[in-house]
Image (cartoon, rainbow, N blue to C red):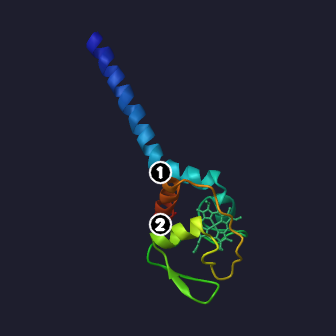
Amino acid sequence: MRTVRLFGAFVLAAVVLGVSACGADGEGAAGIYRTNGCSACHGADLGGGALGPALTWSEGDTVELADGSTATIDADYVERAIVDPSAEIVAGWEDTMPVASLSASEVDLLVDYLLAGP
Ligand code: HEC
């Protein structure tokens, strides 16, 4: 009987640990994206809307900027777009994106999330 109970506790611990580990990357970044208002402008599915462009590109794609130059989508560009939205403005848009208060690790999670695509 004792062994059975111990085994049950072990299984329960494994399930709890497994669930929280998943939450750290997948839902974690999506949650940060939602709770910081990103989805209000860029859409819950990253498809964009009236207030912000779609974020459906992939790493290596080219983005046209308002000053006529182009930028290549990579981790540096996406990070800069989040922490310093005024640094580069996407062509056809205004400098209206607010600076969110995010920790460095939240920014890293968001960059990975956005580069992974919808
Ligand atoms: C009030 C609306 C608004 C909110 C909130 C907002 N953005 Fe933006 N975002 C914009 C607009 C408008 C642009 C285009 C202008 C520019 O480049 O700054 C943009 C540009 C971007 C770009 C560059 C897109 C490209 O194609 O080069 C990224 C990446 C981005 N936003 C991510 C985010 C993330 C992540 C959040 C949440 C922390 C967020 N945005 C919150 C409006 C918003």
Q: Which residue type does callout 2 highlight?
A: Leu
As drawn, the residue found furthest toward the left would be 3
- For mark 1, give the secondary structure: helix
Q: Is residue 19 above or below residue 29?
A: above
Q: Quadrant of residue 97?
A: bottom right
Q: Quadrant of the N terminus?
A: top left
Residue shown at 60%/75% (left/top)?
A: 87
Residue at (43, 44) in percent of width and height:
22
| Coordinates of residue 103 in the picture (x, y in percent) | 54, 53
Q: Which residue is mark 2?
A: 115
90 relative to 110 in the view: left or right: right
Image spot of residue 55 (x, y percent): 57, 69
Residue 84 in the image, given as x and y percentages of width and height: 60, 69
Compared across the picture, whether 30 is left or right of 67 comes to left
Please identify the quarter of the rendering in which residue 70 is found.
Answer: bottom right
Residue placed under numbered mark 1 in the picture? 26
- Is the CB of the residue bearing disc 1 within 8 angstroms of ligand 1? no
